[in-house]
């Protein structure tokens, strides 16, 4: 089993303020950040991570993000490879909701439900590049997107910022901010990369080891719509509080792992830097 450590920080912040001044950029392009042996590529189509090349414990470099060879393939993608999804990631039952006494009908794109923001969510739009620094101690790229009132049925304008930063020890930080400009609106952003820490050509991830600092999962119905309840993972196949082989108990779950974890927060510190992968929130 390959041994690679990558620290991934996925942070969603409801911002109380937003700095304007984004640079309009309508062309779809590829951008690279590099820090030592760690490099990552992005595109402003969907603020997408295209690749993340990191060294393993023996110094061998490999790309640990699944993706495509061309931007055109991302534009035709239906799996949300590497993209930012929103305005609301996951599913909204019946593609509708009521907020402050007003009922909103959304654009359904998975049967009667909405998935990952609708037919044209944040993964299928061109983002602006506000800041791009491909050198220095902490190379970064900042993408911004202005979601208009009524887009896919959601109320109010929304200003969204996603910042990717390369930090020390092969760390990739992902920070997401969203500010409602005129009306209250639901927001649930997600970074939707598919990771294979053995390298994207290494085959199945079922033999890889993972630790998830989440003691509860969201309960879902038969259409995978969250019910609003949380269930403890202890004693279930969803329990990864201690490092576990991903495929060791997957057959106990009829459709495999397709669930949301309620992460316990940053109070849980990573103690073993040789583990395969981890999340922090």
Image: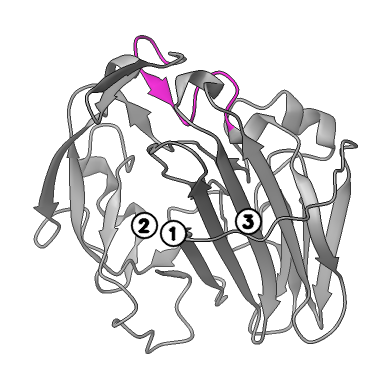
Q: Quadrant of residue 185?
A: top left
- The residue to which callout 2 is attached is 246
Where does residue 168 sit, x and y in percent of width and height?
66, 86
Depth order, front residue of 44/24: 24
| Residue 207: assigned label | 1
Secondary structure that dominates the magenta span:
loop
For the residue labelled by badge 2, is the local secondary structure a helix, a strand or a loop?
Answer: helix
Where does residue 166 sit, x and y in percent of width and height?
70, 75
Residue 197 seen in this snapshot: no
Q: Earlier in the sequence, mark 3 or mark 2?
A: 3
Where does residue 170 sit, x and y in percent of width and height?
66, 79
For the residue labelled by badge 3, is the local secondary structure a helix, a strand or a loop?
Answer: strand
Residue 153 seen in this snapshot: yes
| Residue 162: assigned label | 3
Instruction: Read off the magenta span.
Output: 110-121
| Residue 34: assigned label | none
């Amino acid at each position: 089993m390959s041994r690679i450590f990558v620290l991934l920080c996925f942070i969603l912040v409801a911002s109380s303020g937003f700095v304007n001044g984004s640079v309009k950029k309508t062309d779809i392009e590829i951008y690279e950040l590099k820090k030592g042996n760690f490099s990552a590529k992005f595109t402003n189509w969907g603020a997408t991570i295209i690749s993340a090349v990191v060294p393993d414990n023996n110094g061998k470099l490999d790309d640990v993000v699944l993706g495509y060879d061309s931007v055109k393939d991302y534009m035709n993608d239906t799996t949300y490879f590497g993209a930012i999804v929103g305005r609301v990631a996951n599913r909204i039952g019946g593609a509708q909701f009521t907020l402050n006494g007003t009922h909103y009908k959304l654009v359904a794109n998975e049967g009667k439900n909405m998935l990952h923001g609708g037919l044209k969510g944040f993964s299928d739009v061109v983002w602006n590049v506000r800041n791009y620094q491909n050198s220095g101690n902490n190379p970064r790229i900042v993408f911004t997107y202005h979601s208009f009132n009524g887009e896919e049925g959601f109320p109010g304008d929304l200003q969204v910022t996603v910042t990717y930063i390369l930090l020390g020890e092969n760390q990739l930080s992902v920070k997401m901010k969203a500010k409602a400009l005129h009306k209250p609106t639901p927001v649930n952003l997600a970074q939707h990369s598919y990771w294979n820490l053995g390298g994207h050509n290494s085959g199945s991830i079922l033999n890889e080891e993972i630790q998830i600092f989440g003691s509860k999962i969201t309960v879902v119905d038969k259409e995978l719509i969250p019910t609003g309840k949380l269930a403890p993972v202890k004693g279930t196949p969803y329990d990864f509080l201690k490092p576990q082989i991903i495929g060791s108990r997957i057959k106990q779950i009829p459709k495999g792992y397709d669930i949301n974890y309620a992460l316990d927060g940053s109070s849980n510190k990573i103690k073993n830097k040789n583990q395969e992968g981890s999340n922090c929130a």
